[in-house]
Image: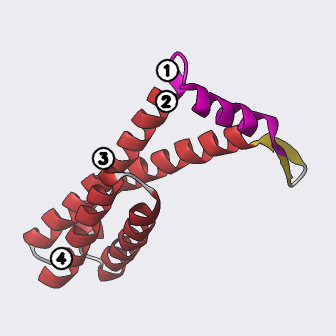
Amino acid sequence: MSSRAQVLFQVGAWAWVVTGVGHLAITALLLGRPAPPAAEKAVLEAMRAHRTSMMGLSRDLLGLHVGFSVAMGLVLALHGAVGVLAAPALAARPAVVALNAAVSLALLAISARAFPPPPIATMLVATASFSAALVVR
């Protein structure tokens, strides 16, 4: 494995870290603002009012939304951090690099369909970096 492949792997991993940390920061900012606009407040209240049962537990939709959002940010940031810290070992394993490229591509497709530009850009960087790391090996 070349050092270039390792650097490309680390760039992809950092893109995951940036995406996860950004996701957590936006979630915290939105939850911490004093008062959302009236239309958004109505939606949030409706989400709080609607409950659903899953495996014997009752949860409101807002709690589920926030919980999934925080979990997604943590997973992205921490998986990326593992990639950054263990890049020498992980970048040498084609299956790991290919899996990261495939997951990044899937997240890019989801981002392009559902999210604003920042995660589209970071997942584009991650997809390109992991894919390039496979090629330059």
Q: Mark 2–mark 4 contact, CB under 8 Å?
A: no
Q: Is residue 35 magenta?
A: yes
Q: Mark 1–mark 2 contact, CB under 8 Å?
A: yes
User: Which residue was labeled with disc 3?
Assistant: 18
Whole-number angstrom distance, CA of label 1 to CA of label 2 = 6 Å
Q: Earlier in the sequence, mark 4 or mark 1?
A: 1
Q: Residue, x 24% and y 77% (percent of image)?
A: 131
Q: Is residue 53 above or below residue 124?
A: above
Q: Residue, x 32% and y 59% (percent of image)?
A: 120
User: Which residue was labeled with disc 1?
Assistant: 33
User: Which residue was labeled with disc 2?
Assistant: 30
Instruction: State which region is magenta.
Output: 31-51
Depth order, front residue of 120/58: 120
Whole-number angstrom distance, CA of label 3 to CA of label 4 = 19 Å
Q: Residue, x 19% and y 75% (percent of image)?
A: 133
Q: Amino acid at mark 1?
A: Arg
Q: Is residue 100 left or right of residue 88?
A: right
User: Which residue was labeled with disc 4?
Assistant: 132
Q: Secondary structure at mark 3?
A: helix
Percent from the top left, x then y, of residue 6?
16, 67
